[in-house]
Amino acid sequence: MAIWDKLKTELDRAGKAAQNALDEGKVRLEAFRTRQLADKAAQALGYAVYRAKQSGAELDPETYARLSATLGTHETEASRLEQQLHDLGASPKPETKSEAKSDEPPSPPASASSPPPAADAAPPPDIPAI
């Protein structure tokens, strides 16, 4: 009967691993959806500020408070879910290009075919100088 006990133990272990994977997937999906909501809230706030500036006015305080509170709520929830993922032992999702925060400007692509033009070089003859 030792083989049956070992089989039962291994099946239980596999079942727990599968359940943990499902739980992690649910939390990961919820975190993704919450991050999307935060992005939409940030976009709405940006559009509101842009439209106010275009019309020559400032964004009214009530609208700003409402939109920034919505953004803050979604950011807090996303952080909580990412912490929950960390606690489950899942590696955090890699940052996407829109989430990467860097103080350095992106480096230009390396071009081996031609060196960059000199700053004091004259423009080609068919292009008028500015």
Image (cartoon, rainbow, N blue to C red):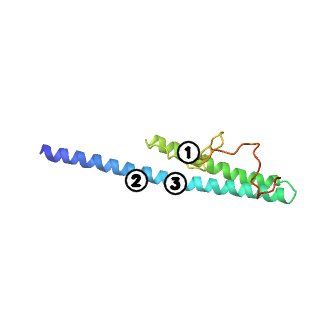
Q: What SS does tag 1 mark?
A: helix
Which residue is tagged 2?
A: 22
Viewer-nearest residue: 123 or 36: 123
Residue 73 image position (x, y, % from top left): 64, 50
Residue that carries the numbered disc 3 in the rendered image: 30
Query: Residue at the location (36% across, 51% down)?
Result: 19
Quickly name the residue at label 1: 80
Left or right? Give the position of 30 relative to 71.
left
Q: Distance between the Cα atoms at labels 1 and 3?
A: 11 Å
SS of the residue at dot 3? helix
Count every numbered label the image shows and give the total. 3
In the figure, is residue 51 to the left or right of 68?
Answer: right
Instruction: Judge from the rendering whether residue 20 lies leftward or rightward of residue 44; answer left or right.
Output: left
Residue at 53 percent across and 53 percent down: it is 32
Choose between 47 and 111: the one closer to the eye: 111
Q: Amino acid at mark 1?
A: Arg
* Residue 16 image position (x, y, % from top left): 33, 48
Q: Residue at x 76, y 51 (%)?
A: 123
Q: Identity of the amino acid at label 3? A: Glu
